[in-house]
Image (spheres, rainbow, N blue to C red):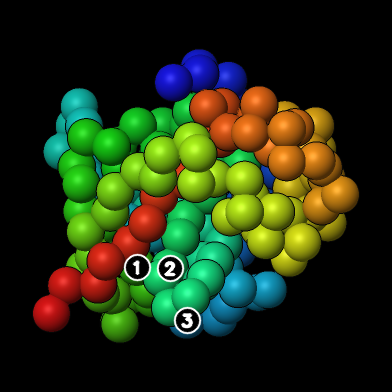
Amino acid sequence: MSTRYEEPNRIAQAGNAVIRWLAELGVSIAGTQALHVRGRKTGKSRAVVINLLTVDGVDYVVSPRGNTQWARNVRAAGTVEIGSRWRRRPAAITEVGDAAKPELLRRYLARWYWQVKGYVAGLTPESSEEQLLAAAPSIPVFALATRA
């Protein structure tokens, strides 16, 4: 696992806070959702805004900035809650292996490249399979399984 992490600047942090607030209210901008995960050190619920990618009926969450705090919390917790403040649904979450990431990253970039182009390990929607595979260890991707 790579330790790449592209820290957001203050403007990005402020923008993410606004978009997270809207997602908490149930307002999705270009597929955004609120993700809540228990902190691995404090045990407190932490919220982050994510882009939910659905491929063949499976929901995926990508951490384009790399090994972020929320990605590390997800690995430790194994469960998250997705959705607005009033309609959160619990889900089990597992990390996807590097070999399966290129196609998921290609689809993610095709949809959200305009949003993540500055911090997705130099990838573009036209990146080759080899480039996607080379970057895969530095970009965490998780699969969600909604709990009944």
| Left or right of 96 on screen, residue 90 | left
Q: Residue at x 65, y 74 (%)?
A: 29
**Residue 6 visible from this viewpoint:** no
Q: Residue at x 44, y 21 (%)?
A: 1
**Residue 58 visible from this viewpoint:** yes
Residue ID for mark 1: 82
Q: CA distance from mark 2 to mark 3?
A: 18 Å
Q: Residues within 10 Å of mark 3 (few under 14, many from 20)?
A: some
- Where in the figure is residue 135, as x and y percent of width and height? 65, 29
Q: Nearer the viewer, residue 127 or 138?
A: 127
Q: Disc 3 on helix, strand or loop?
A: loop
Q: Residue at x 26, y 66 (%)?
A: 145
Q: Disc 2 on helix, strand or loop?
A: strand
Residues tagged 2 and 3 counted as in contact (Cβ below 8 A): no
Mark closer to the observer (2, 1): 2
Q: CA distance from mark 2 to mark 1?
A: 11 Å
| Left or right of 47 on screen, residue 109 | right
Q: Disc 1 on helix, strand or loop?
A: strand
**Residue 24: quadrant of the picture:** bottom left
**Residue 22: quadrant of the picture:** bottom right
**In the rendered structure, which disc, 2 or 3, sits on the residue that comes first in sequence?**
3
| Left or right of 75 on screen, residue 53 | right
- Where in the figure is residue 90, as x and y percent of width and height? 21, 68
Residue ID for mark 2: 59
